[in-house]
């Protein structure tokens, strides 16, 4: 299988004025295969969102290169569709209007748009809520709309930044099951950020464990759990053993974390 | 079960609460009217300082019967409407451009800073010199008193667009034009409309000042002329009329707002 999304020696640092330069990601290289579901896993502030922003083209690397099908990503890339943690729905558009947005931008006609949008509204089980405004929906439902909106635009890669972090445990499990079902149906290449090991284990083909500050790849773990998966498998002994061994890796990393290494003084200081 | 029982109970409670507040409204007005009636009827206040409610009613009845009152209301309303509409037509597009294109802001800034402290009344000498004392001059005064507020509200609302929504739109394939029409304008619209509502009241006070200083008709002229004739009841009729007209205009604006911003309805509950 060929890599669809690649990062080559990517470094991203932010200039924070008086605080100096923050190196968010350092010399990170990663290949993501077509159809693969990869979880980026790591502690808060280790540069996961930064990586996602680089893949989406929201920000540019300080050095190195990110590429989609070997073509460097230099601007906002609609072929890498983003699901934001805070939904980012258009409050003035109804559920249907939000889901139709990407199709409208692609120039799809009104009637075709409506049919396509309905497909995805049904897929995320929001049938009957087409004419509601986002503000009238619960958090879980809003996140379903975001998912339907991005799926309807049919990007080549899905980038999801802790999409379920704001949801309660029960809704999160339901959404994880939904995502498993949708991925089993379309095998869309997905990069999914999480800092829940359970979420990473249940969803991913591979888990990329990132080290904190500056963000680097600590380990890449191929998920041995077989598909189809269900949330219920989280209480099997095999699963728990796997989780325990992964935890050791993470704990070792946390122990090595050196708080002072995050800031490199800028020349201005 | 408990919720089903509790909900209607709370509803009744809220209804009785509302009825109560309404009753207090009426009682307060009745009390002030009663005091007024008493104070003027018993001769505690001389009629040359405050006419009795009966006198005011009589004055209103005469004015309404000969059709002058409605004419004055309509004449003033027309001036407000023309000046306000002109200001909105100029300032809304200008404010949006200032919001998205910094050179436009740089061009406008000095003029806005210099002109903003000037109340519209200070434009009266120049406007009479340039435009005479006809309709155009009244409209010009309303325009001069309104355009900067509409401009500033529009600019602020345009600036306050959520950058996440801009990213989301571009990620879904929106170009510059679509970002403007599909994101910036709809998200600025509530702010622009509330700016228009505030400005409408200001426009009314502009027209009244202009009419008091130089006009044959309109509510401002009505009050000023009544004062010259020593007809105090008519002055009060004019003031009451202004209150009612502005209230009506506010109410119409609120209806229009509800119609234009269906997604904001949920927010207001
Ligand atoms: N725009 C920015 N300007 C300055 N520093 C930034 C900016 N964005 C991120 N950083 C810094 O870069 C580092 C990595 O941030 P990033 O948001 O990628 O972390 P994260 O892994 O997504 O964390 P979390 O799990 O909390 O979302 C942090 O130290 C953060 O403070
Ligand atoms: Mg993040």
Image (tube, coloured by chain):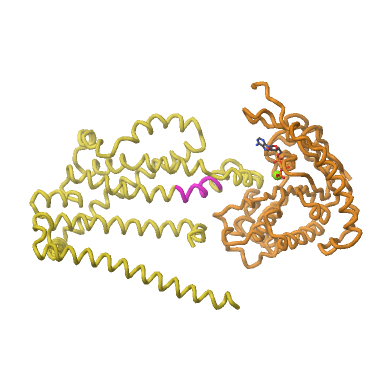
Which residue is at the front of the view, A212 or A87? Answer: A212
Secondary structure mainly formed by the magenta segment: helix
Quarter holding the C terminus of chain A?
top right
Give the image quarter of residue B68.
Answer: bottom left
Quadrant in the rendering for residue B177: top right
Q: Position of residue B63 (x, y in %)?
A: 14, 60
Viewer-closest of B78 and A232: A232
Seen from this angle, which residue lies furthest front? Answer: A255
Report if residue B253 lies within the magenta region: no
Identify the residue at horizontal 51%, vertical 40% (top origin): B159
B130 is higher (above) or lower (below) than B41: above
Task: Tell me where residue B139 appears, x and y as whole percent.
Answer: 27, 44
Is B188 colored magenta in this rendering? yes
Chain A appears in which tint?
A: orange
**Foreground: B254 or B76?**
B254
> At x 19% / y 67%, what residue is drawn?
B34
Q: Quadrant of ligand 2?
A: top right
Q: Residue at x 70, y 52 (%)?
A: A163
Q: Give how far across and how far down residue B190 sits, in percent.
A: 47, 51
Residue B66 visible, this angle? no
Q: Which chain is yellow?
A: B
- Relative horizontal placement of residue A215, taking residue A19 as reference (left or right): right
Which contiguous range is marked in magenta?
B183-191
The quadrant of the picture occupied by the N terminus of chain A is: top right
């Amino acid at each position: 299988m060929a890599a669809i999304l690649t990062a080559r020696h990517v470094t991203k640092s932010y200039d924070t004025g008086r605080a100096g330069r923050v190196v968010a990601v350092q010399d990170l290289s990663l290949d993501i295969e077509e159809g693969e579901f990869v979880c980026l896993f790591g502690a808060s502030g280790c540069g996961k969102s930064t990586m996602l922003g680089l893949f989406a083209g929201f920000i540019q690397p300080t050095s190195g290169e990110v590429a989609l099908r070997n073509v460097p990503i230099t601007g906002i890339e609609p072929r890498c569709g983003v699901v934001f943690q805070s939904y980012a729905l258009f409050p003035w558009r109804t559920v249907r209007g939000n889901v139709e947005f990407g199709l409208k931008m692609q120039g799809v006609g009104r009637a075709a748009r409506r049919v396509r949008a309905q497909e995805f509204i049904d897929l995320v089980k929001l049938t009957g809520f087409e004419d509601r405004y986002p503000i009238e929906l619960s958090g879980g439902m809003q996140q379903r709309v975001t998912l339907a909106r991005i799926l309807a635009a049919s990007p080549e890669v899905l980038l999801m930044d802790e999409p379920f972090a704001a949801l309660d445990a029960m809704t999160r499990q339901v959404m994880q099951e939904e995502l498993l079902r949708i991925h089993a149906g379309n095998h869309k290449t997905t990069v999914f950020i999480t800092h829940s090991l359970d979420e990473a284990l249940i969803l991913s083909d591979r888990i990329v464990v990132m080290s904190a500050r500056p963000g680097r790849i600590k380990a890449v773990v191929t998920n041995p759990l077989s598909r189809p998966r269900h949330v219920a498998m989280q209480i099997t002994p095999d699963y728990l053993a796997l989780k325990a061994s992964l935890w050791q890796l993470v704990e070792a990393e946390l122990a090595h974390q050196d708080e002072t290494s995050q800031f490199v003084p800028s020349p201005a200081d | 079960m408990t919720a089903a029982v509790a909900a209607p109970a709370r509803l009744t409670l809220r209804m009785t609460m509302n009825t109560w507040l309404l009753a207090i409204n009426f009682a307060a007005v009745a009390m002030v009217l009663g005091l007024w009636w008493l104070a003027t009827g018993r001769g505690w206040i001389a009629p040359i300082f405050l006419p009795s409610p009966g006198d005011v009613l009589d004055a209103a009845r005469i004015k309404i019967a000969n059709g002058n009152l409605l004419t004055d209301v309509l004449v003033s309303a027309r001036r407000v409407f023309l000046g306000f509409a002109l200001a909105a037509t100029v300032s809304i597009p200008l404010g949006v451009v200032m919001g998205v294109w910094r050179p436009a802001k740089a061009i406008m800034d000095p003029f806005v800073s210099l002109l903003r402290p000037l109340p519209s009344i200070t434009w009266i000498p120049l406007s009479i010199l340039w435009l005479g004392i006809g309709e155009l001059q009244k409209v010009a005064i309303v325009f001069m008193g309104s355009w900067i507020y509409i401009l500033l509200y529009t600019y602020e609302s345009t600036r306050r667009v959520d950058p996440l929504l801009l990213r989301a739109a571009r990620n879904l394939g929106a170009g510059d034009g679509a970002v403007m029409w599909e994101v910036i304008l709809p998200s600025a619209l509530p702010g622009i409309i509330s700016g228009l509502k505030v400005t409408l009241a200001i426009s009314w006070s502009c027209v009244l000042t202009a009419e008091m200083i130089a006009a044959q008709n309109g509510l401002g002229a009505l009050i000023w002329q009544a004062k010259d004739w020593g007809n105090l009841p008519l002055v009060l009729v004019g003031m009451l009329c202004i209150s009612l007209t502005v209230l009506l205009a506010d109410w119409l604006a609120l209806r229009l707002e509800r119609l234009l911003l269906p997604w904001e309805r949920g927010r207001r509950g």
